[in-house]
Each structure stands twice: as structure tokens, then as C-alpha cells.
Image (spheres, rainbow, N blue to C red):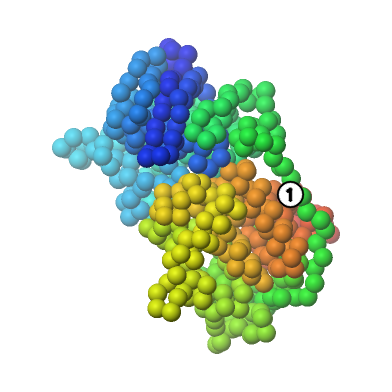
């Protein structure tokens, strides 16, 4: 990688962008030093993604100027951005799943009419990039067969293959396990050492403080602060993001658990390929407590939520809930579980929580649309749905507070607020909640955590699944750890720490004996 001759890889001056009545960006100034990792943070809806979309050519700014290496450039398309040396890895990957890694990387950059020569050249260049940046991935593998962390490496390879010297990553760890996230940051450090400038968009302050050289803060479409990362801390950044002091710890009293409201005994589940994903899982959930399920993503937590919620029928075992015994021979579906007052916030809001083509007020009643509250004598009561959606948007600070906006047009964090508000406001006896703050900014995290604790204190039972250990430890009263589809340990919140949970998550802990040799 050639060394930069100008002190700033990218400079923005007076960038503004309006969508109708919404001023998404207002007079943004930014200077990103060459060969650094530069963080950009802000609440959901602060304008971060819009600004990056302008840099990458998805949108054209209404006013302002962009300079690359000291030269002003016109970026009206992604092709212009790529030509200027800018690459972008989106939060939701832009890959053709049934193509190989090589085919995805080459797509749109085939190298001329002689495809065979282009393939040979691409394979050689990818090998060089993999070695130079520690981006090992099988170029012949089909993308849909790769874990999400490797799919992200393919996106980075795509950008580097096209000559990116400025790499933008939008919420890159939102879909990664902690181990995958750690490897990503090692890759970013390697990129920086080779002269690539990295712009990191994230809401996770720990990641910003651990990996960036400088950080810029956006709020309500404006750039409000720039800091050297070494000269700031979580508290200052959180306050700059939200515009007020933010509690970074969950404020909750000791739990007062009551009667058992849900019990599961020897739950097993085999997937369509005959692989056992749940292995005789047993647990009890009491009213007035939060039971956390910890584990590296992919160790049975998702299957457990789906079986308990009625989305997936169990293979064997039984569930006792609301006076009912549910088994493989006497199953209940998700609608029937909702009728028994079980609510479910799924881990993947796009696949299971929303219909992104629906307007917000329609998404806000999904699963509960047969309720008398939303139905008149002949037709659905649209006014009742709109009124309730407006109330929830105000209570949960959904931005923009527009019930007619299509769900797809909200940021990820605001989509999550719509889903969680829908489930929590039903006042369930049991709330199953998966990854409650994935892709959510720090101000919204505080609100979501408060609502979960409030439900617990009202005598409700909460089963919480999260790959964020901080979240599990902060919210849970008891913690169960899963590994390879089975429960491998349980600790109380007072006994939990990262080392103990981490060893359990790796199945390397013997109670009373410590870590296995």
C-alpha cells in the first residue's frame, strides 16, 4: 500500500442532506487523518448512515464538498466512490449467497471479456490480499455455507480488491460473536498498519475506546464533537451522544422471585438435517426474575427461544406453562403461546420480528392484529392502531415518530424499539427476549433495560438471551450457560464474572475444580 502524502485521507466541509421535512445531515465538517481508525458514533437516527451513504455515493449531498487526499472530488454514485478509493462494508452484507467467494469478489469487476484470464488474476490477487491483511477465507467456498464472520471478511476483500484505501464499516460487530469481533479488530489494525484509513460506525463505546485513534460524535444530524480517543471516556462520549448524562449501569434492586411460571424438562430438537440442536435442556423460570442465557452465538440459544415460543415444535421433552403441558405429541404454535400470555422478541428483527414493507403502525400490532382492541365490527380499527402507535413511539422515543413511515426506512435501533414496545406493552406473564439491544444506541439501551427491569419488578418472568456478557451480567438474576445445545452451568448474578462465564461458554469449567487443564 502506498503511503499517503496528504495528512487527511478524507475531508468533509459543510455537508447537508434533507429528505422532505427531515434534515438528516446539517453542515457536517470532518477531517479523518490518513492511516488511522476513526470512529463515528451517535444515537440511532443521528445521521451517521446517511453521511456514510453520501461518502459512498448512495446519496448526493444537497450542499458541501468532499476531498480525498487533499483533492476535491465529485461522488454521485458508488462507482465514483470506488474510483476515488473508497470501500464500504454494510451492516447487512451485499453478497450473492449462492455464489462462491471468488465470484462475489469479482462481481462487477470481472476484468474484461476474457473471463478465464480474469479469474486467474483475481485468484492471485485475493491470495496476496489474504496474506497481507490476515483475511484467510476459502475463495472456492459458497458464501451461504460460511459463518457470518467469514462473510464479513469477504466484504472487506471485495473492497480491497477494488483498490479501497478508505474503508467504511457500518456497525460491523452487530452480527458477530465476541470471538469474531476480536478477530475483526485485529484485521482492522493490520489494515491500518498497511496504510488503509478505516472509518468505523458503531454504537458500542467499548469498541470505540479499544480500537480507534480518534472519534467524532453526531447528534440530531449535526457533528457535535471530535475527540482523541485516548483523551476521552465512556461517560463523556455517552453524554455527547445523547445530550444529557446517561447511566451506564443498570439500576435495579435485588429480585424477589415468586412461583415457577414456566418449566422445561429434557427439551430436544433435531433440525431438518437430523442434527441435534437442543440436547435435553431443562430450566425453571420464576415470576419476578430475569433468567439470562449466555453462550457464544450458535450454541442452541436461538433454537431454545423458538421451541419455547412455539415457532418450532420440539422433538421430545415437555414444557409446563399457564396450566398447560406442551409436548411433541401435544404442541402449541406461536399464536397459541401468545394467547397464554407469552411474548417473544426474536433475535433477528428482520426475519422474524417485522414485515419491512409494512408501515410502522401495522408492524406495531403484528401477531396481535386479531385482538378486539384493533378490530371494529367489519374492518380493522385503523384509528385505534394509529393512536396506540403514536403513544408507543413517544414512550419509546422512536425516531422519526411517524406511524406511516415504512418499517424498512427506520434505522436498525428504531426498528428494534418498535418490536420490543409491541411485545412489552402486551403485559405478558413471560417475556422471551433475544438480543434486546443488538444494533441499538446507548440512550435506547438504557430505556430498554429499564423496561425489562420494570417488567420483572411487576412480577413478570423474563428469559433473556444475549451474546453481550455485560448485558447478561447487568440484567440477569440467574445465568444459565449453553454450549453445543446443552446447559453446561448455572450461576447467580452475584457469582458471575467474565472469566467464569467465558470458561463455561467454552465448556472449559468444572464446578468446584476451576478450569480444565
Q: Position of residue 407 (x, y in %)?
A: 43, 54
Judging depth in this view, the residue of 470 and 444 nearest the camera is 444
Q: Position of residue 468 (x, y in %)?
A: 64, 50
- Furthest residue in direction bottom, as rendered: 329
- Furthest residue in direction top, as rendered: 5
Q: Position of residue 13 (x, y in %)?
A: 43, 20
Instruction: Look at the image and tell me whether residue 437 can be seen.
Output: yes
Q: Quadrant of the N terminus?
A: top left
Q: Residue at x 51, y 30 (%)?
A: 222
Q: Which quadrant of the view contains residue 42?
A: top right
Q: Residue at x 63, y 34 (%)?
A: 243
Judging depth in this view, the residue of 89 and 106 nearest the camera is 89
In the rendered image of this protein, does residue 10 appear above or below residue 322? above
Name the residue beneath numbered marker 1: 250
Q: Which quadrant of the view contains residue 507?
A: bottom right
- Furthest residue in direction left, as rendered: 113
Tally of numbered tags:
1
Mark 1: give few (<14), some (14-19) or many (20+) Cα within 10 Å: some
Q: Residue at x 28, y 42 (%)?
A: 107
Instruction: Look at the image and tell me whether residue 348 can be seen.
Output: no
Q: Residue at x 64, y 70 (%)?
A: 428
Q: Is residue 426 left or right of residue 47?
A: right
Q: Position of residue 403 (x, y in %)?
A: 46, 55
Label 1: element kind: loop
Judging depth in this view, the residue of 103 and 128 nearest the camera is 103
Q: Is residue 102 left or right of residue 26?
A: left
Q: Which quadrant of the view contains residue 232?
A: top right
Amino acid at each position: 500500500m502506498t503511503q499517503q502524502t496528504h495528512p487527511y485521507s478524507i475531508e468533509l466541509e459543510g455537508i447537508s442532506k434533507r429528505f422532505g421535512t427531515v434534515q438528516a445531515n446539517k453542515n457536517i465538517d470532518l477531517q479523518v487523518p490518513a492511516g488511522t481508525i476513526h470512529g463515528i458514533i451517535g444515537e440511532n437516527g443521528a445521521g451517521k448512515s446517511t453521511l456514510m451513504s453520501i461518502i459512498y455515493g448512495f446519496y448526493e449531498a444537497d450542499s458541501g464538498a468532499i476531498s480525498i487526499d487533499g483533492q476535491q472530488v465529485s461522488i454521485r454514485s458508488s462507482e465514483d466512490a470506488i474510483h476515488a478509493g473508497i470501500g464500504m462494508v454494510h451492516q447487512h452484507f451485499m453478497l450473492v449467497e449462492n455464489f462462491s467467494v471468488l465470484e462475489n469478489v469479482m462481481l462487477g469487476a470481472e476484468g474484461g471479456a476474457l473471463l478465464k484470464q480474469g479469474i486467474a488474476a483475481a485468484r492471485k490477487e485475493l491470495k496476496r490480499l489474504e496474506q497481507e491483511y490476515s483475511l484467510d477465507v476459502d475463495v472456492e467456498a459458497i458464501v451461504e455455507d460460511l459463518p457470518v464472520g467469514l462473510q464479513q471478511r469477504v466484504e472487506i476483500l471485495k473492497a480491497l480488491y477494488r483498490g479501497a484505501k478508505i474503508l467504511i464499516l457500518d456497525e460491523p460487530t452487530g452480527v458477530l460473536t465476541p470471538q469474531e469481533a476480536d478477530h475483526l479488530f485485529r484485521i482492522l489494525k493490520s489494515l491500518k498498519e498497511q496504510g488503509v484509513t478505516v472509518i468505523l460506525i458503531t454504537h458500542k463505546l467499548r469498541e470505540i475506546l479499544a480500537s480507534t485513534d480518534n472519534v467524532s460524535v453526531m447528534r440530531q444530524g449535526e457533528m457535535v464533537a471530535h475527540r482523541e480517543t485516548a483523551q476521552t471516556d465512556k461517560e463523556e462520549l455517552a453524554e455527547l451522544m445523547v445530550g444529557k448524562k446517561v447511566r451506564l449501569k443498570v439500576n435495579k434492586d435485588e429480585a424477589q422471585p415468586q412461583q415457577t411460571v414456566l418449566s422445561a424438562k429434557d427439551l430436544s430438537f433435531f433440525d431438518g438435517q437430523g442434527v441435534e440442536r437442543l440436547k435435553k435442556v431443562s430450566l425453571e423460570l420464576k415470576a419476578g426474575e430475569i433468567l439470562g442465557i449466555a453462550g457464544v452465538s450458535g450454541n442452541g440459544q436461538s433454537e431454545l427461544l423458538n421451541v419455547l415460543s412455539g415457532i418450532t415444535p420440539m422433538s421430545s421433552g415437555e414444557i409446563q406453562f399457564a396450566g398447560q403441558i406442551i409436548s411433541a405429541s401435544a404442541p402449541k404454535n406461536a399464536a397459541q403461546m401468545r394467547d397464554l400470555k407469552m411474548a417473544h422478541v426474536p433475535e433477528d428483527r428482520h426475519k422474524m420480528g417485522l414485515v419491512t414493507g409494512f408501515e410502522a403502525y401495522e408492524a406495531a400490532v403484528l401477531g396481535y392484529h386479531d385482538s378486539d382492541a384493533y378490530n371494529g365490527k367489519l374492518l380493522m380499527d385503523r384509528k385505534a392502531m394509529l393512536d396506540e402507535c403514536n403513544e408507543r413511539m413517544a414512550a419509546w422515543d422512536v425516531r422519526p415518530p411517524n406511524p406511516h413511515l415504512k418499517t424498512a426506512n427506520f434505522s436498525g435501533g428504531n426498528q428494534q424499539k418498535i418490536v420490543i414496545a409491541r411485545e412489552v406493552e402486551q403485559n405478558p406473564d413471560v417475556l422471551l427476549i433475544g438480543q434486546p439491544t443488538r444494533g441499538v444506541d446507548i440512550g435506547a439501551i438504557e430505556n430498554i433495560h429499564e423496561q425489562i427491569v420494570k417488567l420483572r419488578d411487576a412480577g413478570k418472568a423474563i428469559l433473556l438471551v444475549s451474546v453481550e456478557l455485560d448485558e447478561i451480567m447487568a440484567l440477569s438474576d440467574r445465568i444459565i450457560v449453553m454450549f453445543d445445545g446443552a446447559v453446561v452451568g448455572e450461576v447467580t448474578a452475584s457469582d458471575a464474572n467474565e472469566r467464569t462465564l467465558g470458561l463455561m461458554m467454552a465448556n472449559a469449567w468444572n464446578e468446584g475444580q476451576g478450569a480444565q487443564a
